[in-house]
Image (spheres, helix red, strand yellow):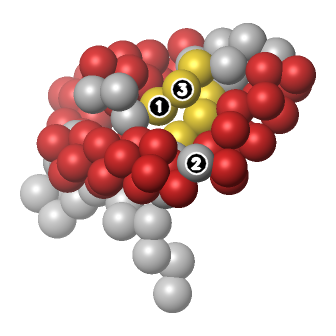
């Protein structure tokens, strides 16, 4: 899908910078600009498809980032968890 983000991306700055460099995300400054960009994307199938393809490629390029972040967090812990500890998968079933 085509991606839009607001100006406050501090918590995932590196990911947004990667997406922005790949022209896979449009950064909007306010609600008016968001509405305008959404309308433009809905009206332009080719632009929407191009941006979605760029986002998919950037997501593939970012694959493994969760594991890297997890490894960094674990390295900062005072007592290293057992070797059976693994990164959360997001699957809560």
State which mark lies toward you, 2 or 1.
2
Residue 41 screen position, x and y as percent: 62, 44
Task: Give the number of callouts.
Answer: 3
On screen, residue 37 above or below 47: above
On screen, residue 71 above or below 31: below
Mark 2 secondary-structure assignment = loop
On screen, residue 13 above or below 39: above
Q: Which residue is mark 3?
A: 26
Task: Specify the label residue 25 is tagged with.
Answer: 1
Residue 54 screen position, x and y as percent: 30, 43
Q: Which one is earlier in the sequence, the residue at label 3 or at label 2?
A: 3
Q: Where, by quadrant of the figure, is residue 37 drawn? A: top right
Q: Which residue is mark 2?
A: 44
Dots 1, 3 in contact, CB < 8 A: yes
Disc 2 residue crowd, few under 14, some 14–19, many 20+, Cα 10 Å = few
Task: Specify the label residue 45 is tagged with.
Answer: none
């Amino acid at each position: 899908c085509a991606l839009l983000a607001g100006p406050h991306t501090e918590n995932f700055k590196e990911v947004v910078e990667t997406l922005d460099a790949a022209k896979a995300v449009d950064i909007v400054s306010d609600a008016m600009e968001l509405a305008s960009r959404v309308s433009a994307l809905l009206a332009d199938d080719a632009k929407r498809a191009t941006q979605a393809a760029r986002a998919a490629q950037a997501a593939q390029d970012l694959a493994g980032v969760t594991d890297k972040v997890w490894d960094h967090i674990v390295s900062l812990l005072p007592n290293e968890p057992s070797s059976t500890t693994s990164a959360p998968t997001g699957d809560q079933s």
